[in-house]
Amino acid sequence: MNVWLNFLIESLAFGAVFMYGSTGEILTEKSGHLNLGIPGIMCMGGAGGCMVLNMIGGLNLHPVLVIILGVAGALAMSMLMGLIYSFLTVTLRANQNVTGLALTTFGVGLMKVIMSKLDPTVYLVGPKKIFRWPFAGRTDALQYLGVLFFVGVAIAIIASWVLFRTKVGLRLRAVGENPGTADAVGINVTKYKYLATCIGSGISGLGGFYCIIDYMASQEAYLSLEAYGWLSIALVIFALWRPHMTILGSTVFGFLFSCSSYIANIEGITVTMAAKPLLKMLPYLVTILVLIVSSIRNKRENQPPASLGLPYFREER
Amino acid sequence: MEKKIALSMRGITKRFGSVVANHNVDLDVYEGEILSILGENGCGKTTLMNMISGIYFPDEGKIYKDGQEVVIRSPKDAFDLRIGMIHQHFKLVDLFTAAENIVLGIDEKGQHNLKAVNSRVSQIAEKYGFHIDPQKKIYDMSVSEKQTVEIIKVLYRGADILILDEPTAVLTPQEIDRLFTVLKRMREDGKSIIIITHKLHEVLAVSDRVAILRKGEHIATVNTCDATESSLTEMMVGKKVTLDIDRSDPVDPQPRLEVKGLTCLDKEGIHVVKDVSFTANSGEILGIAGIAGSGQRELLEAIAGLQPIASGQIIFTNPKKDKPVTFFHKSMKRVKEMAAKDAFHDKEGKPMRLKGMSNGQIKAQVAAGNVLFREDEVMNLRGKTPLEIRSLGVRLSFVPEDRLGMGLVGSMGITDNMMLRSYRKGHAGFVDRKKPRELAEEIIKELEVSTPGVNTPVRRLSGGNVQKVLVGREIAFAPKVLMAAYPVRGLDINSSYTIYNLLNKQKKNGVAVIFVGEDLDVLLALCDRIMVINSGAVTGIVDARTATKEEIGLMMTQTETPAKEAAQ
């Protein structure tokens, strides 16, 4: 296969990690909550899924059941994190940034402890084959497009459809734009905030699980998860708060992020050790560019939700 | 024809903490009528209506809709009872289209179908004579269009009782006419309309009946045809209450601050201060009366250098110490002329007319430094920042209405708050904390601020103590002009009197005090002159010793033409 096409497909597969992360974050942000706990939630999602796989490893279950249980484990763990976040920020109205950062620190640390206790031969070797069945046996980049990659693309498209084409989406966006207005027309603001945050966290957590089991499928994968979490948050800006845009955005990010290591494989290009980290900065650089361009154009639709980061409570006099 | 009662309230009471916002209110609304709720600011009009629309829940009392007792706990309950409120601050999502805002939150079966919504919106608009484009985004709309969206939003939900909170406050006269036409059409359609307002002429123009509220209580409901502007005003402001505030006569008032034709625009380009002219004299308290939001805040902020000024001048006259005359050698004639006009005085302050003196004698006197004159520094504060105003040597103090927002930093102690005025002093980048600390201790002692210590965050102090700290700081600055916006708002009686006394003391010290107040009794008892503003324009300046509450009440609420007559 053409080396560049190969590279593109790998970027697509790699980008799906961010796609999951930022689709989840977009849902949360649309409810007016900036969840900086995404890196930690992705880590915990990965850890949760791997724990379940570790437990059922010896049972020889049907592959579909393995996938379902693994996904359920990842969802449960990350939604639990989302629930903690929403309880603190929605009900107790704690500062969103502080809460998010605390969850990240907590999640990353706990994930490392959990992962070090698990057995890669049980949770990884067998399940890896199950998750990668669509292109089993291929040796080119297509092998990386596992089950969860397609699930992720579907989730991003469905999320966009829900947000921009349904009544639920209209209400959710109203909550994020102007919770007072939403409240006045009888929308249960707290419910929407909780649901958006928990479902968003679940989707992000799946990204962590996808990264460990499906895309990277190595026992060191979890070590770089936190960095991917931060990239996911940057991708939200790149995607201009539209979930379907994360499909394109994540491919660009994946391409830029991995080009440092990939370019070296292409003949005629040498990358020095010093240049590698510089090349890894490219996604952030692009994010800043997008931010600048969207700020200059100043189109209302491309701005973050108006009440992002602000706690809401019915005003008393 | 006997009309049916659509909604009635019985014995409604609502408290916020210790403040009673509504007390034992009974009110009936008939089908097919326009009812005005009239009252001063803070009389509980909006609170009462918020209880019908589900924003607040009454502490006591019952609400009946079509004869049935109902419990309204949320805006959704109100919608279900076909009651809709159009708030003063529109509750719309800027990013959505008109149609999206209108259907937001409605539980209808079936697909999210904006096309159907659009056509239904157009239908409603046509029925009542609105003009609206359902696909237009809210952020592209004018204020009047936004209001239309709000009204249609309520109608779309099938409301038959519509409450409009000060619907005309933001509209142009043409837009108001259009709104009234629409309201009358709705009345003919059998809907009950309640408008909250304090504009008398609108009450008379559009409503069938008027309910008057005063200090949270329902005073009376009268038929509009039986009411006149003065009868309504009387019910609205009530009988005069005598207050025990010492008021001394102004001593030697000199023009200190002269505002000429001041005009300010807000973000939308609407006039918030319209061609305001007045003079604040030293040793005098000038009161500013007006319905809240008539431009008082913007006016004071414009003077303080915090609000951009569209046109007009702010002339500050800074009194200077006596100076010996030095310019006689240029023109002896001019010296004589000025002397004849009492421009000069001797060291005891007695006027020197230099009459009957020869040129030589005058020269001798001048050379000896016996002929003094007072040179007032006159400067224009227009377009200057607060810092520039201060560096000009203009001692202007401003006690803003938002104490913890603009006046003080809530999370800092008293000492640190004192330093907000003096942080530029000190050496080599280090601030001088000693003097502010002394000042803080002095204020605590002098004004009897009850606080655990100078470093307790001021946010934790009670409202009265916060205000004492703020006023104390501004007074310590030895101002020539002291502007105080609602300085006693939310304060108990004792703290209020402390503030009145402080202001009176400043007046005696020759400070030009500008006092923005809401309680007419206080304004009449405390001030020397009262300037009344109405929608950003001055409707008159009256003598506080002779003016009556009704007179001021009328000036506050009437529209342009009659108000101008009253001012003359």
Image (cartoon, coloured by chain):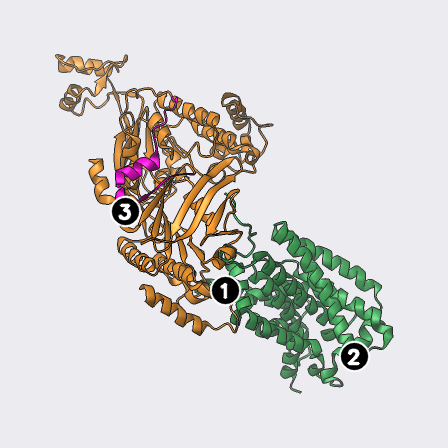
- The colour with which the image depicts chain A is green
Depicted B147 relative to depicted B36: above or below: below
Q: Residue at x 55, y 29 (%)?
A: B433
Q: Position of residue B37 (x, y in %)?
A: 37, 45
- Residue visible at 37% across and 27% down in the picture: B241
Indicate the position of residue B467 as horizontal and vertical percent values.
48, 31
Mark 3: which amino acid? Answer: Leu
Q: Nearer the viewer, mark 1 or mark 2?
A: 1
**Residue B127 left/right relative to A165:** left
In the rendered view, tell whether residue A147 sits above or below residue B312.
Answer: below
Q: CA distance from mark 3 to mark 1?
A: 36 Å
* Residue A63: image tag: 2
- Coordinates of residue B53 in the picture (x, y in percent): 47, 52
The quarter holding residue B250 reads top left
Please state which of residues B499 and B119 is positioned toward the viewer in this rendering. Answer: B119
Q: Position of residue A195 (x, y in %)?
A: 62, 62
* Mark 2 or 3: the one toward you: 3
Please tell me whether mark 3 sits on a helix, a strand or a loop. Answer: helix
Q: What chain does mark 2 sit on?
A: A
Q: Which residues are magenta?
A: B217-245
Residue annotated with mark 3: B204
Between the C-alphas of marks 2 and 3, the distance is 79 Å
Left or right of B188 on screen, residue B465: right
Q: Amino acid at mark 1?
A: Ile
Specify whether residue B547 is painted magenta: no
Q: Which chain is orange?
A: B
Numbered disc 2: secondary structure: helix
